[in-house]
Image (spheres, rainbow, N blue to C red):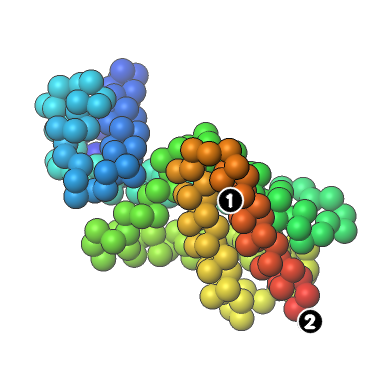
């Protein structure tokens, strides 16, 4: 984290969390360039000076958001990769199992996956997201290795990365949808997307 002043009291920590959550929401909705620190202060209903107590500028906030969310995503996929699975589970059932958990996670952290859209801002942040992608792919490989021991990460890295990026794209579309029929269609699209990859990975000899 790149917080200028570490919050020492409970209300200060709550204020920093409010700033980060508000900033993440605005970055996701308006984009990084279109969002100002004044926007963040107005939506958070705090004086703009409160932001500068803890952060030097908007980019400082963005780095902290990406770092915080990266840690949360990392923890989620570590837990997902070790969840118990029923014996003889089919690829479609695996896909639904993973989809349900990703959507539940995203519902609890509604701005989080949007952090993957911040990487275009500069090369430093792109590198951080790229490293997080690499760790997630490793967790996904561990998950598959439990179902098919001996799964080769090196050989299948690119396909796992495409699986992950494709799932993120569909989840973001799902969360942006307002129509139940469209949401159900997108839900099935996520399941089918993952099922296609799990079918392939589990059939490799």
Question: Where's residue 108, x and y in %?
Answer: 52, 34
At x 34% / y 23%, what residue is drawn?
14
Quarter the N terminus occupies? top left
Question: Where's residue 124, x and y in %?
Answer: 27, 62
* Residue 88 occupies quadrant: bottom right
Label 1 vs 2, first from the N-terminus: 1
At x 32% / y 42%, what residue is drawn?
29
Query: Closer to the camera, 80 or 158?
Result: 158
Question: Where's residue 134, x and y in %?
Answer: 49, 65
Say few, some or many: other residues with alpha carbon within 10 Å of mark 2 (under 14 / 14 to 19 / 20 or more). few
For mark 2, what is the residue?
205
Mark 1 or 2, closer to the camera: 1
Give SS at disc 2: loop
**In the displayed structure, would residue 131 be above or below residue 179?**
below
For mark 1, what is the residue?
186
* Residue 131 occupies quadrant: bottom left
Between the C-alphas of marks 1 and 2, the distance is 31 Å
Q: Are marks 1 and 2 in contact (CB under 8 Å)?
A: no
At x 41% / y 40%, what residue is drawn?
111
Query: Closer to the camera, 164 or 29?
Result: 29
On the question of residue 172 being in view, the answer is yes
Q: Residue furthest left?
A: 49
Query: Closer to the camera, 35 or 187?
Result: 187
Question: Where's residue 173, x and y in %?
Answer: 48, 50
Q: How many marks?
A: 2
Query: Closer to the camera, 162 or 13?
Result: 162
**In the displayed structure, would residue 24 be above or below residue 41?**
below
Give SS at disc 1: helix
Which numbered disc covers residue 37?
none
């Amino acid at each position: 984290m790149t917080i200028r002043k570490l919050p020492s009291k409970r209300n200060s920590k709550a204020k920093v969390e409010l700033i980060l959550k508000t900033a993440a929401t605005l970055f996701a909705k308006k984009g990084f360039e279109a969002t100002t620190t004044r926007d963040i202060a107005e939506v958070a209903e705090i004086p703009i000076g409160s932001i500068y107590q803890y952060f030097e500028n908007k980019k400082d906030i963005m780095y902290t958001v990406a770092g915080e969310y990266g840690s949360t995503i990392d923890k989620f996929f570590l837990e997902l990769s070790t969840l118990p699975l029923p014996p003889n589970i089919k690829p479609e059932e695996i896909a639904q199992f993973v989809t349900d958990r990703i959507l539940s996670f995203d519902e609890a952290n509604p701005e989080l996956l949007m952090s993957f859209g911040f990487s275009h801002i500069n090369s430093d942040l792109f590198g951080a997201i790229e490293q997080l992608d690499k760790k997630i792919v490793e967790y996904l490989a561990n998950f598959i290795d439990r179902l098919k021991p001996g799964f080769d990460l090196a050989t299948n890295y690119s396909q796992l990365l495409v699986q992950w990026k494709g799932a993120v794209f569909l989840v973001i579309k799902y969360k942006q949808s307002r129509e139940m029929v469209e949401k159900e269609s997108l839900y099935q699209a996520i399941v089918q997307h993952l099922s296609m990859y799990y079918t392939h990975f589990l059939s490799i000899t």
